[in-house]
Image (cartoon, rainbow, N blue to C red):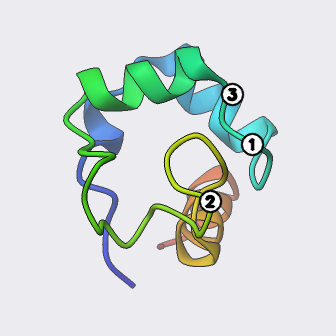
Amino acid sequence: MESIEWWPSLDATTKDWLIAHNGEALPADVVSKVVAAGGIVTSNAWWIGEDGPDGFLSDEAVDWIEAVGNAEEP
């Protein structure tokens, strides 16, 4: 599984939100923080789900964040 390259650049509050709300639609403020951290949401990035950056993360990204939240190796 690939690593989410922008994850280390996110602030702790956004990381906590993504872990607590993993699999939910991304609100605009979270999308903007991901972009500020280096996430390119207009690309075909593997972590963007079918609904695009205004929708959900991909299943792979949800699994990756879940592993991080559980202190497992993603």
x and y, in percent, of residue 65 in the image: 58, 57
List the residue tagged with mark 2.
51
Establish if 26 lies above or below 63.
above
Query: Of the residues under marks 2 and 3, which one precedes in the sequence?
Result: 3
Q: Residue at x 30, y 66 (%)?
A: 45
Label 2 secondary element: loop
Give the number of the disc on residue 25.
1
Query: Of the residues under marks 2 and 1, which one precedes in the sequence?
Result: 1
Observer-side mark, 1 or 3, equals 1
List the residue tagged with mark 3.
17
Cα distance between the residues tagged 2 and 3: 20 Å
Query: Of the residues under marks 1 and 3, which one precedes in the sequence?
Result: 3
x and y, in percent, of residue 4 in the image: 34, 58
Q: Residue at x 48, y 73 (%)?
A: 74
How many residues crowd mark 1 within 10 Å: few (<14), some (14–19), many (20+)?
some
| Residue at the farthest bottom position | 1
Using the rendered view, name the quadrant where residue 66 is placed.
Answer: bottom right
Q: Amino acid at mark 1?
A: Ala
Q: Nearer the viewer, residue 58 or 18?
A: 58
Cα distance between the residues tagged 1 and 3: 12 Å
- Do tag 2 and tag 1 residues touch (Cβ < 8 Å)? yes
Q: Residue at x 29, y 49 (%)?
A: 42
Observer-side mark, 2 or 3, equals 2
Cα distance between the residues tagged 2 and 1: 9 Å
Label 1 secondary element: loop
